[in-house]
Amino acid sequence: MATYQLDITREHCPMTFVKTKIQLSKLNSGDLLEVFLTEGEPLTNVPKSSTEQGYTVLEVSHVKDNIHKVLIQK
Amino acid sequence: MDFTEDQIQRYSRHILLQDVGPEGQEKISQAKVLMVGAGGLGAPAALYLAAAGVGTIGIIDGDVVDLSNLQRQIIHFTPDVGKAKVTSAQEKINLLNPDVRVEVYPYLLNASNALEIIGKYDFVVDGTDNFPVKFLINDACVLAGKPFSHGGILRFQGQTMTWLPGHACYRCVFQAPPPPNLVPTCSEAGVLGAIAGMLGTIQAAEALKFITGVGELLTDRLLTFDARSMEFRNVKVKSNAHCGVCGEHPTILQPEDYAQATCELKQT
Ligand SMILES: [Zn+2]
Protein backbone atom coordinates (compact mmCIF):
# COMPACT_ATOMS: atom_id res chain seq x y z
CA MET A 1 0.00 0.00 0.00
CA ALA A 2 1.62 3.21 -1.16
CA THR A 3 0.92 6.86 -0.45
CA TYR A 4 0.92 9.44 -3.25
CA GLN A 5 0.61 13.21 -3.25
CA LEU A 6 -1.21 15.64 -5.48
CA ASP A 7 -1.15 19.42 -5.43
CA ILE A 8 -4.30 21.00 -6.88
CA THR A 9 -3.95 24.35 -5.14
CA ARG A 10 -3.68 26.12 -8.50
CA GLU A 11 -6.67 24.38 -10.09
CA HIS A 12 -10.24 25.58 -10.33
CA CYS A 13 -13.53 23.71 -10.42
CA PRO A 14 -14.05 21.26 -12.04
CA MET A 15 -10.39 20.60 -12.84
CA THR A 16 -9.75 20.10 -9.12
CA PHE A 17 -11.72 16.87 -9.08
CA VAL A 18 -10.69 15.94 -12.63
CA LYS A 19 -7.02 15.99 -11.58
CA THR A 20 -7.89 14.07 -8.42
CA LYS A 21 -9.69 11.39 -10.42
CA ILE A 22 -6.84 11.03 -12.89
CA GLN A 23 -4.36 10.53 -10.06
CA LEU A 24 -6.68 8.08 -8.29
CA SER A 25 -7.09 6.08 -11.49
CA LYS A 26 -3.36 5.35 -11.46
CA LEU A 27 -3.42 3.96 -7.91
CA ASN A 28 -4.04 0.41 -6.80
CA SER A 29 -6.97 -0.39 -4.58
CA GLY A 30 -6.05 0.43 -0.99
CA ASP A 31 -3.41 3.03 -1.92
CA LEU A 32 -3.62 6.47 -0.33
CA LEU A 33 -3.63 9.88 -1.98
CA GLU A 34 -2.85 13.10 -0.13
CA VAL A 35 -4.51 15.95 -2.00
CA PHE A 36 -3.40 19.48 -1.21
CA LEU A 37 -6.06 22.04 -1.99
CA THR A 38 -7.31 25.47 -1.02
CA GLU A 39 -10.29 26.57 1.04
CA GLY A 40 -13.64 27.29 -0.54
CA GLU A 41 -14.86 25.31 -3.53
CA PRO A 42 -12.00 22.74 -3.64
CA LEU A 43 -12.21 21.96 0.07
CA THR A 44 -15.99 21.63 -0.13
CA ASN A 45 -16.26 19.67 -3.34
CA VAL A 46 -13.25 17.36 -3.67
CA PRO A 47 -13.96 15.33 -0.51
CA LYS A 48 -17.69 15.29 -1.33
CA SER A 49 -17.22 14.19 -4.95
CA SER A 50 -14.63 11.60 -3.92
CA THR A 51 -17.07 10.05 -1.47
CA GLU A 52 -19.91 10.14 -4.00
CA GLN A 53 -17.80 8.31 -6.57
CA GLY A 54 -16.87 5.50 -4.22
CA TYR A 55 -13.55 6.56 -2.72
CA THR A 56 -12.98 6.80 1.03
CA VAL A 57 -12.03 10.13 2.55
CA LEU A 58 -10.02 9.25 5.65
CA GLU A 59 -9.03 12.66 6.89
CA VAL A 60 -9.19 16.38 6.16
CA SER A 61 -6.55 18.49 7.89
CA HIS A 62 -5.31 22.06 7.83
CA VAL A 63 -1.77 22.48 6.54
CA LYS A 64 -1.07 26.21 6.65
CA ASP A 65 -2.70 29.45 5.57
CA ASN A 66 -5.57 28.48 3.27
CA ILE A 67 -4.05 25.11 2.29
CA HIS A 68 -5.68 21.89 3.42
CA LYS A 69 -4.88 18.24 2.94
CA VAL A 70 -7.47 15.58 2.09
CA LEU A 71 -6.42 11.97 2.56
CA ILE A 72 -8.27 9.67 0.17
CA GLN A 73 -8.10 5.91 -0.02
CA LYS A 74 -8.80 4.16 -3.29
CA MET B 1 -2.51 5.96 -20.70
CA ASP B 2 -1.08 9.32 -19.69
CA PHE B 3 -3.33 12.15 -20.78
CA THR B 4 -1.65 15.39 -21.78
CA GLU B 5 -2.68 18.54 -19.96
CA ASP B 6 -4.74 19.53 -23.02
CA GLN B 7 -6.46 16.16 -23.10
CA ILE B 8 -7.32 16.40 -19.41
CA GLN B 9 -8.95 19.77 -20.12
CA ARG B 10 -10.65 18.60 -23.31
CA TYR B 11 -12.15 15.46 -21.81
CA SER B 12 -12.71 16.80 -18.29
CA ARG B 13 -16.49 16.45 -18.48
CA HIS B 14 -16.15 12.77 -19.35
CA ILE B 15 -13.50 12.22 -16.70
CA LEU B 16 -15.82 13.74 -14.10
CA LEU B 17 -18.54 11.20 -14.85
CA GLN B 18 -18.32 8.35 -12.39
CA ASP B 19 -19.25 5.78 -15.05
CA VAL B 20 -16.67 7.07 -17.55
CA GLY B 21 -13.73 8.53 -15.65
CA PRO B 22 -10.13 8.35 -16.89
CA GLU B 23 -10.54 4.62 -17.56
CA GLY B 24 -13.58 5.13 -19.80
CA GLN B 25 -11.94 8.00 -21.61
CA GLU B 26 -8.96 5.79 -22.33
CA LYS B 27 -11.30 3.18 -23.84
CA ILE B 28 -12.85 5.90 -26.00
CA SER B 29 -9.40 7.00 -27.14
CA GLN B 30 -8.57 3.47 -28.23
CA ALA B 31 -11.91 2.75 -29.92
CA LYS B 32 -12.52 2.47 -33.65
CA VAL B 33 -15.95 3.38 -35.00
CA LEU B 34 -17.13 3.15 -38.61
CA MET B 35 -19.73 5.63 -39.87
CA VAL B 36 -21.57 4.29 -42.88
CA GLY B 37 -22.76 7.50 -44.48
CA ALA B 38 -21.72 11.08 -43.78
CA GLY B 39 -25.22 12.45 -44.22
CA GLY B 40 -28.05 13.41 -41.89
CA LEU B 41 -27.30 10.80 -39.22
CA GLY B 42 -23.59 10.40 -39.80
CA ALA B 43 -22.92 14.13 -39.55
CA PRO B 44 -24.01 14.66 -35.93
CA ALA B 45 -22.85 11.19 -34.90
CA ALA B 46 -19.37 11.76 -36.35
CA LEU B 47 -19.09 15.17 -34.72
CA TYR B 48 -20.03 13.89 -31.27
CA LEU B 49 -17.77 10.86 -31.57
CA ALA B 50 -14.93 13.12 -32.69
CA ALA B 51 -15.59 15.53 -29.85
CA ALA B 52 -15.59 12.57 -27.46
CA GLY B 53 -12.12 11.63 -28.64
CA VAL B 54 -12.87 8.32 -30.35
CA GLY B 55 -9.42 7.22 -31.45
CA THR B 56 -10.24 6.19 -35.00
CA ILE B 57 -13.31 7.17 -37.01
CA GLY B 58 -13.85 5.56 -40.39
CA ILE B 59 -16.25 7.22 -42.83
CA ILE B 60 -17.58 5.54 -45.94
CA ASP B 61 -19.68 7.59 -48.36
CA GLY B 62 -19.52 7.93 -52.12
CA ASP B 63 -21.48 11.17 -52.38
CA VAL B 64 -20.43 14.76 -52.84
CA VAL B 65 -21.94 17.56 -50.77
CA ASP B 66 -25.06 19.02 -52.35
CA LEU B 67 -26.74 22.29 -51.41
CA SER B 68 -29.87 20.33 -50.44
CA ASN B 69 -27.85 18.42 -47.82
CA LEU B 70 -27.02 21.45 -45.72
CA GLN B 71 -30.48 21.70 -44.13
CA ARG B 72 -29.59 18.72 -41.90
CA GLN B 73 -26.06 17.38 -42.59
CA ILE B 74 -24.37 19.70 -40.14
CA ILE B 75 -20.81 18.48 -40.65
CA HIS B 76 -20.87 20.06 -44.15
CA PHE B 77 -20.75 23.82 -44.68
CA THR B 78 -21.75 26.00 -47.62
CA PRO B 79 -18.24 26.19 -49.13
CA ASP B 80 -18.13 22.37 -49.14
CA VAL B 81 -20.77 22.02 -51.87
CA GLY B 82 -19.26 19.85 -54.60
CA LYS B 83 -16.63 18.34 -52.30
CA ALA B 84 -16.57 14.63 -51.44
CA LYS B 85 -18.55 14.15 -48.23
CA VAL B 86 -15.80 12.05 -46.70
CA THR B 87 -13.29 14.85 -47.31
CA SER B 88 -15.60 17.52 -45.93
CA ALA B 89 -16.29 15.41 -42.84
CA GLN B 90 -12.61 14.60 -42.36
CA GLU B 91 -11.71 18.29 -42.43
CA LYS B 92 -14.27 19.20 -39.75
CA ILE B 93 -13.24 16.31 -37.52
CA ASN B 94 -9.59 17.33 -37.77
CA LEU B 95 -10.52 20.88 -36.82
CA LEU B 96 -12.72 19.76 -33.96
CA ASN B 97 -10.32 17.24 -32.45
CA PRO B 98 -6.80 16.59 -33.77
CA ASP B 99 -6.57 13.55 -31.46
CA VAL B 100 -8.87 11.64 -33.82
CA ARG B 101 -7.48 9.59 -36.67
CA VAL B 102 -9.88 9.67 -39.64
CA GLU B 103 -9.98 6.94 -42.28
CA VAL B 104 -12.04 7.69 -45.38
CA TYR B 105 -13.60 5.46 -48.01
CA PRO B 106 -14.97 7.62 -50.85
CA TYR B 107 -17.30 5.00 -52.30
CA LEU B 108 -20.41 3.00 -51.45
CA LEU B 109 -20.48 0.11 -49.03
CA ASN B 110 -21.38 -3.00 -51.00
CA ALA B 111 -21.51 -6.76 -50.65
CA SER B 112 -17.93 -7.21 -51.81
CA ASN B 113 -16.25 -4.65 -49.55
CA ALA B 114 -18.51 -4.71 -46.48
CA LEU B 115 -16.87 -7.47 -44.45
CA GLU B 116 -13.35 -6.23 -45.05
CA ILE B 117 -14.15 -2.65 -44.06
CA ILE B 118 -16.31 -3.31 -41.01
CA GLY B 119 -13.75 -5.85 -39.83
CA LYS B 120 -11.36 -3.03 -39.02
CA TYR B 121 -13.70 -1.40 -36.49
CA ASP B 122 -15.17 -2.11 -33.05
CA PHE B 123 -18.60 -0.61 -33.69
CA VAL B 124 -20.56 0.42 -36.79
CA VAL B 125 -23.06 3.28 -37.06
CA ASP B 126 -25.63 2.89 -39.85
CA GLY B 127 -26.22 6.42 -41.05
CA THR B 128 -27.56 5.48 -44.48
CA ASP B 129 -30.80 6.60 -46.04
CA ASN B 130 -31.92 3.57 -47.99
CA PHE B 131 -33.21 0.11 -47.18
CA PRO B 132 -30.90 -2.02 -49.34
CA VAL B 133 -27.78 -0.71 -47.61
CA LYS B 134 -29.43 -0.97 -44.19
CA PHE B 135 -30.00 -4.68 -44.79
CA LEU B 136 -26.49 -5.04 -46.16
CA ILE B 137 -25.05 -3.43 -43.01
CA ASN B 138 -27.21 -5.63 -40.80
CA ASP B 139 -26.22 -8.81 -42.59
CA ALA B 140 -22.53 -7.96 -42.74
CA CYS B 141 -22.42 -6.98 -39.06
CA VAL B 142 -24.35 -10.08 -37.96
CA LEU B 143 -22.14 -12.35 -40.09
CA ALA B 144 -19.02 -10.68 -38.69
CA GLY B 145 -20.37 -10.50 -35.12
CA LYS B 146 -19.79 -6.76 -35.20
CA PRO B 147 -21.95 -4.57 -32.90
CA PHE B 148 -23.80 -1.79 -34.71
CA SER B 149 -26.44 0.88 -34.36
CA HIS B 150 -29.31 0.98 -36.84
CA GLY B 151 -30.90 4.35 -37.44
CA GLY B 152 -33.58 5.66 -39.77
CA ILE B 153 -35.49 8.90 -40.17
CA LEU B 154 -38.42 10.04 -42.29
CA ARG B 155 -40.45 13.24 -42.12
CA PHE B 156 -40.84 13.85 -38.36
CA GLN B 157 -40.04 10.34 -37.19
CA GLY B 158 -36.98 8.43 -36.19
CA GLN B 159 -36.16 4.89 -35.15
CA THR B 160 -33.04 3.23 -33.84
CA MET B 161 -31.89 -0.03 -32.32
CA THR B 162 -28.54 -1.45 -31.33
CA TRP B 163 -27.38 -4.92 -32.21
CA LEU B 164 -24.98 -7.08 -30.27
CA PRO B 165 -24.34 -10.78 -30.93
CA GLY B 166 -27.13 -12.86 -29.42
CA HIS B 167 -29.79 -10.16 -29.74
CA ALA B 168 -32.54 -9.42 -32.24
CA CYS B 169 -31.17 -8.01 -35.49
CA TYR B 170 -32.71 -5.50 -37.91
CA ARG B 171 -33.72 -8.33 -40.23
CA CYS B 172 -35.40 -10.20 -37.35
CA VAL B 173 -37.74 -7.22 -37.08
CA PHE B 174 -38.12 -6.04 -40.67
CA GLN B 175 -37.42 -9.27 -42.64
CA ALA B 176 -36.44 -7.79 -46.03
CA PRO B 177 -36.11 -4.51 -47.92
CA PRO B 178 -39.48 -3.24 -49.16
CA PRO B 179 -40.00 -3.49 -52.94
CA PRO B 180 -38.49 -0.38 -54.59
CA ASN B 181 -41.95 0.82 -55.74
CA LEU B 182 -43.14 0.99 -52.12
CA VAL B 183 -40.27 3.15 -50.92
CA PRO B 184 -41.22 6.84 -50.72
CA THR B 185 -39.86 8.74 -53.68
CA CYS B 186 -37.55 11.66 -53.07
CA SER B 187 -40.34 14.19 -53.48
CA GLU B 188 -42.39 12.42 -50.82
CA ALA B 189 -39.54 11.99 -48.43
CA GLY B 190 -39.09 15.28 -46.73
CA VAL B 191 -37.47 15.36 -43.34
CA LEU B 192 -37.27 17.90 -40.55
CA GLY B 193 -33.55 18.58 -40.37
CA ALA B 194 -33.34 18.57 -36.60
CA ILE B 195 -34.68 14.99 -36.54
CA ALA B 196 -31.42 13.88 -38.08
CA GLY B 197 -29.58 15.47 -35.18
CA MET B 198 -31.83 13.81 -32.62
CA LEU B 199 -31.40 10.35 -34.09
CA GLY B 200 -27.72 10.57 -35.03
CA THR B 201 -26.91 11.84 -31.57
CA ILE B 202 -28.71 8.88 -29.98
CA GLN B 203 -26.58 6.61 -32.17
CA ALA B 204 -23.40 8.37 -31.04
CA ALA B 205 -24.48 7.93 -27.42
CA GLU B 206 -25.05 4.22 -28.04
CA ALA B 207 -21.57 3.90 -29.57
CA LEU B 208 -20.03 5.61 -26.53
CA LYS B 209 -22.06 3.44 -24.16
CA PHE B 210 -20.84 0.35 -25.97
CA ILE B 211 -17.22 1.52 -25.85
CA THR B 212 -17.31 2.39 -22.16
CA GLY B 213 -19.67 -0.38 -21.05
CA VAL B 214 -21.98 2.13 -19.41
CA GLY B 215 -25.70 1.45 -19.00
CA GLU B 216 -28.02 -0.67 -21.11
CA LEU B 217 -27.86 -0.54 -24.88
CA LEU B 218 -30.92 -0.42 -27.13
CA THR B 219 -30.79 -4.17 -27.69
CA ASP B 220 -33.99 -6.16 -28.22
CA ARG B 221 -35.93 -2.91 -28.37
CA LEU B 222 -36.63 -0.39 -31.06
CA LEU B 223 -36.69 3.23 -29.97
CA THR B 224 -39.09 5.32 -32.03
CA PHE B 225 -40.07 8.93 -31.76
CA ASP B 226 -42.31 11.38 -33.52
CA ALA B 227 -41.19 14.97 -33.17
CA ARG B 228 -44.71 16.31 -33.76
CA SER B 229 -45.87 14.90 -30.42
CA MET B 230 -42.30 14.51 -29.14
CA GLU B 231 -43.25 11.14 -27.79
CA PHE B 232 -40.59 8.47 -27.48
CA ARG B 233 -41.48 4.80 -27.37
CA ASN B 234 -39.47 1.66 -26.68
CA VAL B 235 -40.93 -1.27 -28.59
CA LYS B 236 -39.70 -4.68 -27.42
CA VAL B 237 -38.43 -6.81 -30.29
CA LYS B 238 -37.41 -10.46 -30.28
CA SER B 239 -34.98 -12.60 -32.21
CA ASN B 240 -36.83 -14.32 -35.03
CA ALA B 241 -36.14 -18.03 -35.43
CA HIS B 242 -36.89 -17.62 -39.15
CA CYS B 243 -34.53 -14.66 -39.61
CA GLY B 244 -32.60 -15.08 -42.85
CA VAL B 245 -29.28 -14.12 -41.30
CA CYS B 246 -29.42 -14.99 -37.58
CA GLY B 247 -32.28 -17.52 -37.43
CA GLU B 248 -32.07 -21.27 -36.94
CA HIS B 249 -31.65 -21.99 -40.65
CA PRO B 250 -29.98 -18.91 -42.12
CA THR B 251 -30.16 -18.51 -45.89
CA ILE B 252 -27.84 -15.49 -46.02
CA LEU B 253 -24.31 -16.74 -45.60
CA GLN B 254 -22.60 -13.83 -47.35
CA PRO B 255 -23.54 -10.14 -47.63
CA GLU B 256 -25.84 -9.50 -50.60
CA ASP B 257 -26.59 -6.40 -52.65
CA TYR B 258 -30.23 -5.46 -53.18
CA ALA B 259 -31.78 -3.37 -55.92
CA GLN B 260 -32.22 0.27 -54.96
CA ALA B 261 -35.12 2.52 -55.83
CA THR B 262 -34.11 4.53 -58.88
CA CYS B 263 -34.45 7.90 -57.19
CA GLU B 264 -31.91 6.91 -54.56
CA LEU B 265 -29.36 5.99 -57.20
CA LYS B 266 -29.08 9.59 -58.28
CA GLN B 267 -27.64 10.43 -54.86
CA THR B 268 -28.74 14.03 -54.94
ZN1 LIG C 1 -31.97 -11.66 -37.19
Image (cartoon, rainbow, N blue to C red):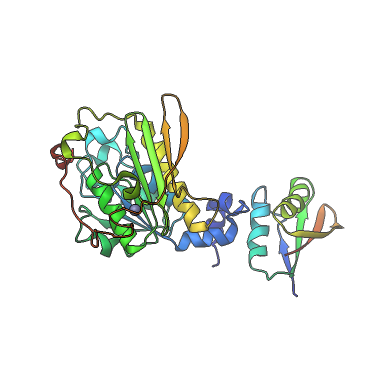
Residue at 65% in and 58% down: A19
Q: Nearer the viewer, residue A63 or A59?
A: A59
Residue B1, given in percent of the width and then of the height, sits at 54, 67
The answer to whether residue B162 shows anywhere in this view is yes
Residue B178, given in percent of the width and then of the height, sits at 22, 40
| Residue B119 lies in quadrant | bottom left
Viewport quadrant of the C terminus of chain A: bottom right
Q: Nearer the viewer, residue A20 or B166?
A: B166
The answer to whether residue B51 shows anywhere in this view is no
Residue at 16% in and 40% down: B261
| Residue B22 lies in quadrant | bottom right
Residue B206, given in percent of the width and then of the height, sits at 46, 49
Residue at 18% in and 37% down: B268
Viewport quadrant of the N terminus of chain A: bottom right
Residue at 41% in and 28% down: B227
Residue B54, given in percent of the width and then of the height, sits at 44, 56
